[in-house]
Image: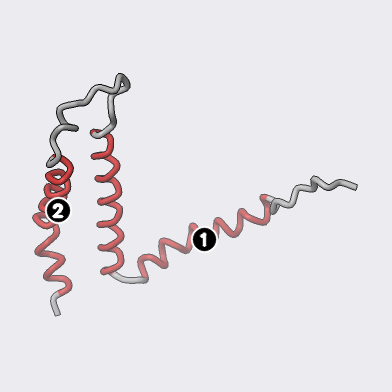
């Protein structure tokens, strides 16, 4: 008796499920409306900005402290710049769009 039977779902059964999901999800996202798409773009921009700024805070291999690590305001200023830049680029149009 084989007690180590492989219970994974076969690949031919999963492929149509993935194809259906990945072909219909963009349409579903668009049908949710403009507000949701604006929010989705802002979330994507924030995630990318977070990753890019995290690259600058990687410590050196030798363990020495960089001058940026001694500056406690650098992360705050980075996020302030991100918020101000987004408001400058998108603020008025978003306020106009959601105005009742």
Between 7 and 89, the one lying in front of the other is 7
**In this rendering, would 17 be left or right of 59?**
right
The mark lying in front, picked from 1 and 2, is: 2
Q: Which dot marks residue 21?
A: 1
Disc 1 is placed on an element classified as: helix
Residue 54, given in percent of the width and then of the height, sits at 27, 38
Q: Which corner quadrant holds the C terminus? A: bottom left
Residue drawn 68% across the image and 52% down it: 12
Between 2 and 11, the one lying in front of the other is 2
Residue drawn 26% across the image and 51% down it: 46
Decide which of tag 1 and tag 2 comes sooner along the chain: 1
Q: Which dot marks residue 43?
A: none
Between 32 and 1, the one lying in front of the other is 1
Between 75 and 28, the one lying in front of the other is 75
**In this rendering, would 20 be left or right of 14?**
left
Residue 57, given in percent of the width and then of the height, sits at 25, 34
Q: Which residue is mark 2?
A: 83
Residue drawn 90% across the image and 47% down it: 1
Residue 94, given in percent of the width and then of the height, sits at 15, 66
């Amino acid at each position: 008796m084989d007690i180590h039977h492989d219970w994974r779902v076969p690949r031919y059964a999963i492929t149509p499920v993935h194809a259906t999901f990945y072909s219909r999800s963009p349409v579903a996202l668009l049908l949710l409306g403009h507000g949701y798409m604006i929010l989705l773009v802002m979330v994507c921009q924030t995630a990318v900005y977070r990753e890019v700024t995290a690259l600058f805070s990687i410590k050196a291999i030798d363990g020495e402290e960089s001058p940026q690590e001694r500056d406690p305001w650098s992360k705050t200023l980075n996020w302030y710049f991100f918020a101000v830049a987004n408001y400058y680029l998108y603020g008025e149009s978003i306020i106009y769009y959601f105005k009742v």
